[in-house]
Amino acid sequence: MNNNQLKHIAAALHAIAFAQFAVFGYTGLIIQPVAWVQLILSTIGFFNIECVAVWVLSYVRDSEN
């Protein structure tokens, strides 16, 4: 894969991470009483997806080399 494809995949993963946290994390936060398990699992999912995005970006190479 070339650099542009890898950057696009990382950007898509970033958007997916925020979308899942917005849906599940925010929902768990506004429910009364607060759904702590849902909020914590959503936070863990967010960080896992972001880690995968950073991992994908680690394969991007500078064009100067």
Image (tube, rainbow, N blue to C red):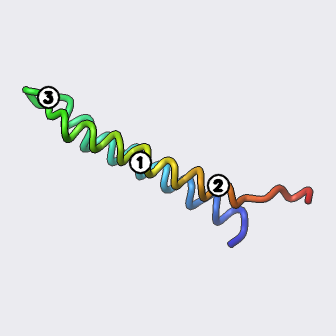
Q: CA distance from mark 2 to mark 1?
A: 15 Å
| Marks 3 and 2, the one that precedes in the sequence | 3
- Check residue 34 in the rendering and tell me which mark sits there, or answer none: 3
Furthest residue to the bottom?
1
Front-most of residues 14 and 33: 33
Please, what is the three-letter code of the amino acid marked with disc 2?
Answer: Leu
Please, is residue 37 above or below residue 9 in the view? above
Q: In the depicted view, which residue is nearer to us: 18 or 56?
A: 56
Q: Is residue 55 left or right of residue 1?
A: left
Q: Up-down: is 14 above or below 7?
A: above
Q: Where is residue 21? Give x, y as percent.
A: 33, 42
User: Where does the image place residue 48, in percent across and percent down from the top left?
Assistant: 43, 49
In the shown orientation, is residue 36 left or right of residue 11? left
Callout 3 amino acid: Val
Q: Indicate the position of residue 25 as horizontal and vertical percent values.
A: 27, 38
Amino acid on which disc 1 is placed: Ala
Q: Quadrant of residue 65?
A: bottom right
Left or right: residue 38 compared with residue 12: left
Point 27% across, 44% down: residue: 41
Report if the CB atoms under discs 2 and 1 are less than 8 Å apart. no
Q: Which mark is residue 57?
A: 2
Q: Residue furthest right?
A: 64
In the image, residue 45 sits, relative to residue 26, either above or below, namely below
Task: Choose the circle earlier in sequence order: 3 or 1.
Answer: 1
Q: Residue at x 24, y 43 (%)?
A: 24
Secondary element under disc 1, as helix, strand or loop, is: helix
**Residue lying farthest left?**
32
- Identified at 14% across, 28% down, the residue is 34
Q: Which residue is mark 1?
A: 17
**Which quadrant of the view contains residue 29?**
top left
